[in-house]
Image (cartoon, rainbow, N blue to C red):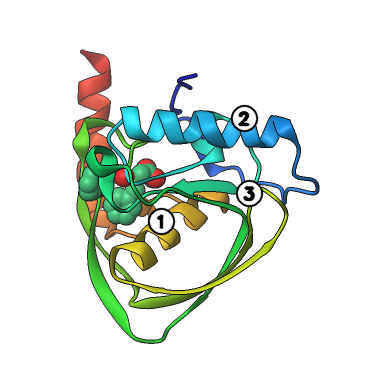
Amino acid sequence: MLLSIVTYPDRRLAIPSHPVTEVTDELRTLAANMAETMYEAEGIGLAAPQVGVHLQLIVVDTSGPEKREALEVYVNPVLTLSIETTDSDEGCLSVPGGYRSKVKRAARVHLSAQDLDGNPIERDLEGTEAVCLQHETDHLKGVLFIDHISSLKRSLYDAKLRKFMKK
Ligand code: K1U
Ligand code: ZN
């Protein structure tokens, strides 16, 4: 089932999410619906608060919406970041207008999470996977990629969006 994606400036995107205390069939259905929604919206990741659910659950497929061959579901993901950084080019399914910007991110991450059977996951990631994981775990903290850009770029984007929303 396709879910509707909450978009900025909806304040629900700024609310931190709660840890998942039990993996239930309801959670598995939510994850499956989030994956379907991510592919339909042509994304490489989606976090539960983007569909209005404030639980620490994300889906990621960095093979892209056309290949769809590397779907991962992470429950309660926690990242440890490298000191080395990289400049990523980011967009967000919750940020209207296809706005994209450069964001400074950790180049590598260590991921600790659980899968949908409650089994622990430990992974070292780099490249697009590392960037995507940082973007999605930010959503779980109520942070958007536009919170990381300069105040000038942010004001320009906000002004453009206000104009667009008045139309
Ligand atoms: O969380 C989201 O809003 C999804 C977002 C994730 C993301 C994008 C860019 C860098 C890090 C994380 C997207 O998927 S936007 C779409 C996108 O960037 C993309 C889509 C298909 C292939 C490659 C990139
Ligand atoms: Zn996003």
Residue 71, percent from left and from top: 42, 48
Give the mark nearest the N terminus, 2 or 1: 2
Identify the residue at horizontal 45%, vertical 75% (top origin): 109
Residue 45, percent from left and from top: 39, 46
Q: Nearer the viewer, residue 110 or 142?
A: 110
Q: CB of residue at label 1: within 8 Å of ligand 1?
A: yes
Tag 3 residue? 56
Question: How far, Cα to Cα, is label 1 from label 3?
Answer: 13 Å
Identify the residue at horizontal 62%, vertical 30% (top origin): 29
**What amino acid type should be assigned to the residue bearing mark 3?**
Gln
In contact (CB < 8 Å): disc 3 and disc 2: no
Give the mark nearest the N terminus, 1 or 3: 3
Tag 2 residue? 29
Q: Is residue 77 left or right of residue 107?
A: right
Query: Image height check: is 128 above or below 62?
Result: below
Identify the residue at horizontal 36%, vertical 63% (top origin): 129
Tag 1 residue? 135
Q: Secondary structure at mark 1?
A: helix
Is residue 55 among what the camera can see? yes
Query: Image height check: is 106 above or below 58?
Result: below
